[in-house]
Image (cartoon, rainbow, N blue to C red):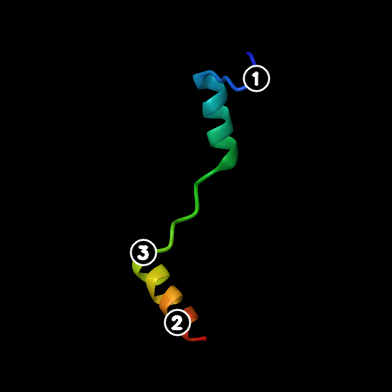
Amino acid sequence: MPAGRACIKSLEHYALKKGNPTKNQSGRQEFIENLINEFI
């Protein structure tokens, strides 16, 4: 395949190799962290 292109099979292999993604932090937690950092 040309550079910058992928087929479904190669994408599947890549996703399975990477494993489960980590969970995102909640938006509220990020808001509170930013608020606290303003005062530090």
Mark 1 or 2, nearer chain start: 1
- What SS does tag 3 mark? helix
From the image, tell me which residue sits under label 1.
3
Going 57% across and 28% down the picture, which residue do you hit?
13
Reply above or below: 22 against 6: below
- What SS does tag 1 mark? loop
From the image, tell me which residue sits under label 2.
36
Q: Could you tell me the amino acid type at mark 1?
A: Ala
The picture quadrant where one finds residue 26 is bottom left
Going 65% across and 19% down the picture, which residue do you hit?
3
Q: Few, some or many C-alpha atoms within 10 Å of disc 2 (few <14, some 14-19, many ≥20)?
A: few
From the image, tell me which residue sits under label 3.
27
The picture quadrant where one finds residue 4 is top right
* Rendered location of residue 1, percent (x, y): 63, 13
Mark 3 or 2, nearer chain start: 3
- What SS does tag 2 mark? helix
Reply above or below: 17 against 26: above
Q: Could you say which is closer to the camera, residue 16 or residue 4?
A: 4
